[in-house]
Amino acid sequence: MEWYEAEERASRRKRSVLIGLTVLVAVVGASVWMAAVSGVPGAWKRSATLPAAVSRAAQQLGSEVGTSARALIPAAGSLAHAVRTRDTRPHIVPAEGKLVHAKPLRFAFNGTAYTITPHVASNVYWGAKTSTRLLTQFEGESDDSWVRAYYHAFADDPEQRPAIDDVCVQLRAIKAGAHLGQDQYLELIAKYVQSIPYDWAVYKAGTGAQRFPVETLVDCTGLCGDKSVLLADLLSHEGYAVALLDFGPEKHMAVGVLGPGKGYGSTGYLFLETTSPCYVTDVPTEYTGGMHLKSAPRVIPIGSGTLEYSAADQIARIITARESAQKAADRLYNSAKSSDLTDADVTAINRKLAQAFKAETSLRSNVIDQNGRSLGTFMDRSVAEQWITRNAWWM
């Protein structure tokens, strides 16, 4: 009898160790994952070489945007005409250059792999590449008005319409083949842009200048501002009501999509991150360098679309499943430690712990590395909903 009890105690210790090891792996994995999530890029450098006189005038404005892209010219005397017509402005004048070919971008949506190959005229690309990044600011013009004009110069340039049309034709073909509804089509377009590799080299060097959407398509990389302007352009082209959300103090930009409720920070728009795959409304908790979004964003509507996103309530359920998984796993583990378990019990518990860990990792934004590879296993909304129904035992 004593031998039997000793063996049982040893068996219980063994099972406890097995559970403990699983939790340890999950905790370590979650820590690594959270480190990756915290690396979602946020700092947005908007710099360019300025003539000395313009640079001095711009720096007096005390703005990061101002020191990088603003030409302040007094509206007086012979300069009055230049100010009225914004002679200093980003715009595409087709220019000769070597032949360019945009890279095909392969990405997954709802578990299926797709490829988009942009077609951008070489002279349009080089015209964008050689364009000034400066924009004349009228004397007395508000910073808000200037910033709106600045980003509209990049989003609205007519020379890039054929390239945007071409990408949307390819996206529409995917929509038709996969029988996507209005919300899923928005998610598809977002996933395409989110899958464009983040430009870590430019971010680290701090030498970034705002790109035109055609540049982002050909370069197949970009900072948050580049990818946000491209996504807003594509969504507005397809009829969605969208805006750029410019977080000045944090030097970050995202996209806002019209939807139910007050939206992000009472802007009327739902938050949509562009730096990596992420759900609509799901705001990353931390960005590179420990940055958190705290300021009220400047809202810059793009286009005249009217379509809204209506799946925010489903996203809320996904986020709830993710945020409650860890506590549920902790409760299960603590209960298991004080229980007399069979081998079958241990197997079942470990399976549940693994499901909770997957919710922690796959139901959140994940980073795309410099080669375009996903560092996580992000589940798109429809896939996530099905997975939660089958596997989220704590819901």
Image (spheres, rainbow, N blue to C red):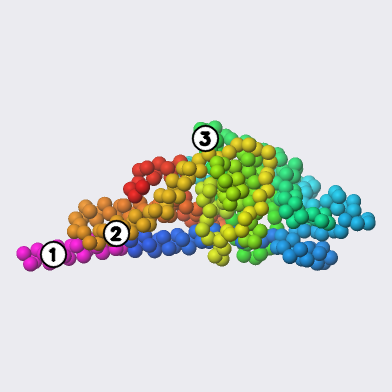
Sequence-earlier tag: 1 or 3: 1
Sequence-earlier tag: 2 or 1: 1
Q: Which residues are magenta?
A: 1-21
Q: Which residue is mark 2?
A: 333
Q: Which residue is mark 3?
A: 180
Q: Residue shown at 59%/56% (left/top)? A: 198
The x, y position of residue 274, in whole percent, is 58, 51
The nearer-to-camera label among 2 and 1 is 2
- Gap in Å between the C-alphas at discs 1 and 3? 58 Å
Q: Residue shown at 82%/59% (left/top)? A: 72
User: Could you say which is closer to the camera, residue 89 or residue 175?
Assistant: 89
The residue tagged with tag 3: helix, strand or loop?
loop
| Position of 292 relative to 229 (above/below) | below
Q: Check the picture and name the quadrant holding the N terminus.
A: bottom left
Give the residue type at disc 1.
Glu
Q: Residue shown at 54%/65% (left/top)? A: 290
**Residue 372 falls left or right of residue 79:** left
Sequence-earlier tag: 3 or 2: 3
Give the residue type at disc 3.
Leu
Give the residue type at disc 2.
Tyr
Q: Which residue is mark 1?
A: 7
Is residue 202 in view?
A: no
